[in-house]
Image (cartoon, grey):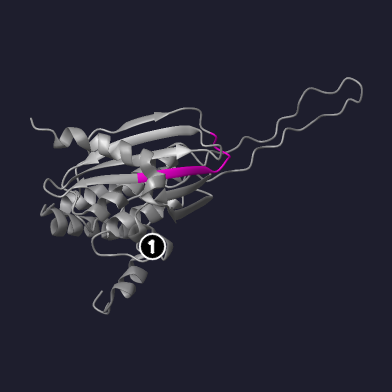
Amino acid sequence: MDSVTSVSQLLCLVRNLQCLPPAGVSHTSLAHWILWFLWKARNLLVFDNRSGSEADSLSKAILAAKEWQSAQAVTKVPPPLPLPADPTTETFTTVLPLPKVSPPLPRTEALIPIPLTKVLPLLPRTEVHTNVPHAEEVFCFTDAAWIASSSSCGMGWIFKTHDQRVIHRGSSTRLHTPSALAAEALSLREALSAASRMDFNSIKVLSDSKVLISLLTTETTTNELQGILHDIALLRRSFISCSFHFIPRKLNFLADVLAKSALAPLNSPV
């Protein structure tokens, strides 16, 4: 270890290290999981001012490695079994086994964002949807309403088909939102998350925030939105086709109504 002078050398070195019993991790490198949870602990300290112990990070790393290891175990397909003989030809028909499909990574680890902004509390969400056409392209309208004095925001999104039929609408609220642009990005992220849960294949996302759409289409980022844009980039991979488009505010009034309606209770005097 004395010869290690860079992070890349360290990663190459620990790749071949074996985890000894009784940890129970034998099919993956535990060292990479430890480094990952040390990085998460670092972010928690820097951005949330919350510290954790080394033992806690190690326990989480071992648990995550075991979960990943278990998810990789593919169930063995039994050998082909002959069907009863054909009474006319006295031949047998063989049932071919289904192809093996490797399971995806555990969902808890598949979409872990790098926290570059303070974690924002999420208030109750409201969603209403009808029959979902999984195969056809869906238009997603999203908007946000933000109050500077309280730093709270309301988010709204609505899904439509080509024939303008509304198939889903939802809204949510957040406290301590740093800016109107952050609110727009959070709303778009919530909309993509809802679309991912509904297993859409193709989606066009429409927003009246020209700055946000420009960031997404040019794949650039800002310090304020880096964590949120990272989440959006990951969610985008859930779809066969996903694109972002700017629309005028007057064409986005339904999502605007949902966002303002969600925000109204937070702005009412107690």
Give left or right: position of 204 versus 1: right
Q: Is residue 137 magenta?
A: yes
Give left or right: position of 165 versus 152: right
Residue name at image x 39 percent, y 44 percent: 252
Task: Identify the amino acid type marked 1.
Answer: Ser
Q: Is residue 252 above or below residue 28?
A: above
Residue, disc 1: 214
Q: Quadrant of the C terminus?
A: top left
Which of 193/112 is in front? 193
**Where is residue 35, by image quadrant?**
bottom left
Give the percent coordinates (x, y) of residue 67: 36, 44
Which of 216/193 is in front? 216
Residue name at image x 47 percent, y 32 percent: 167
Q: Is residue 127 above or below residue 183?
A: above
Residue name at image x 62 percent, y 34 percent: 78
Q: Is residue 19 magenta?
A: no
**Where is residue 5, by image quadrant?**
bottom left
**Is residue 233 visible in the rendered structure shown here?**
yes
Q: Quadrant of the N terminus?
A: bottom left
Give left or right: position of 161 versus 95: left
Residues shaded magenta = 133-142
Rate crowding at label 1 as few (under 14), some (14 to 19) or many (20 or more) other CA atoms within 10 Å. Answer: some
Give the percent coordinates (x, y) of residue 216: 39, 60
